[in-house]
Image: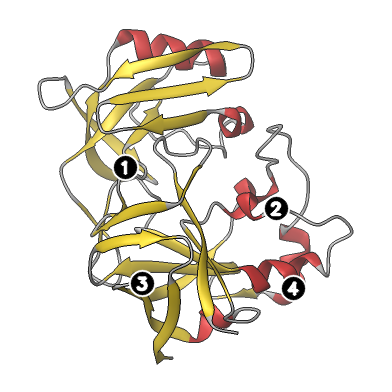
Amino acid sequence: MPATLTELNVYPVKSGGGTALRTAELLPTGLRYDREFMLVNAEGRSLTQRDSGAMALMRPSFDGEVLTVTAPGAAPLVHKAVTGDGEPRDVLVHWKECRGVDQGDEAAAWFADLLGRECRLVRFAGRRETSRGGGVVQYADGYPLLLISKESLDDLNGRLAEPLPMNRFRPSLVVEGLGAFGEDGARLLRIGGTLIEAIKPCTRCVITTTDQETGERGREPLRTLAAYRSGDGGLLFGQNCVPRTVGTLAVGDPVEIVESR
């Protein structure tokens, strides 16, 4: 069966919930609006689900002008994004310095009430380069895209007592038809009219143990991945990728391995 693109997911606020799309514009930094916003603490360090599982309950959407965030028990935040005229801030993503534009006191107060801790919301500004592959990225951990094969999750779920949904792994792109861990053998993929290069396997952290519907943590999938997907400095699941061309992606687009490893 030919391989196809089955999911497109964008995460407008780093470590918030994802927005499933039917079509998306692929830019050098990944899908448009992905990780464009981030919460930081008083020292400017990024806040993620590693710090608070409750961040999984945030459901953000962004149209280029207005950021809307819903969460259980809270009135929705409807925030007109502040651009270059806002207060600039030095911020940290995994202790790497970058820049942001502060989004003001009202947005900060909404997130502080939700999470029970002081924080500020910033919008990406400036430029960040990937450590490998010559890519550029906004507030994502390290790479513009994360690609996972559906069959890879099927393989993992066959080893678990209770299956997990794909959202545990927070992919940008989900493909079907490559086979279990077929993404590991691909170096260059054509998806629709775009080219994407797989740079390195994604090492997985405690966020994968966080239920994206409840914010609660367990032990899986890390315990099971440790038994058969360990290497390259961690537990591996999915491929970090860099766009080599830009264009429009759509669910149902054909996926072709142009060059294998």
**Neighbour class for label 2 at 10 Å: few (<14), some, many (≥20)?**
few
Are the residues tagged 4 and 3 within 8 Å (C-beta)? no
Residue at image position (77%, 54%) is: 220
Mark 2 to mark 1 CA distance (whole Å): 24 Å
Work out whether residue 205 or residue 62 is closer to the camera in this orientation and state it. 62
**Neighbour class for label 1 at 10 Å: few (<14), some, many (≥20)?**
many
User: First in sequence: mark 1 or mark 3?
Assistant: 1
User: First in sequence: mark 2 or mark 1?
Assistant: 1
- Callout 1: helix, strand or loop? loop
Q: Position of residue 195 (x, y in %)?
A: 30, 75
User: First in sequence: mark 2 or mark 4?
Assistant: 4
- Indicate the quadrant where residue 126 lies: top left
- Callout 3: helix, strand or loop? loop
Amino acid tagged 3: Gly
Amino acid tagged 1: Tyr
| Residue 166 visible from this viewpoint | yes
Compared with 207, 232 (above or below) is below
Work out whether residue 9 or residue 208 is closer to the camera in this orientation and state it. 9
> Residue under circle 3?
192
In which quadrant of the rendered image does the N terminus lie? bottom right
> Residue under circle 4?
155
Q: Position of residue 71 (x, y in %)?
A: 57, 21
Callout in the foreground (2, 3): 3
As drawn, the residue found furthest toward the right would be 161
Mark 2 to mark 4 CA distance (whole Å): 12 Å
The label number, if any, that marks residue 165 in the structure image:
2
Amino acid tagged 4: Asp
Work out whether residue 179 or residue 110 is closer to the camera in this orientation and state it. 179
Mark 1 to mark 4 CA distance (whole Å): 31 Å
- Callout 4: helix, strand or loop? helix
Q: Position of residue 105 (x, y in %)?
A: 32, 9
> Residue under circle 1?
33
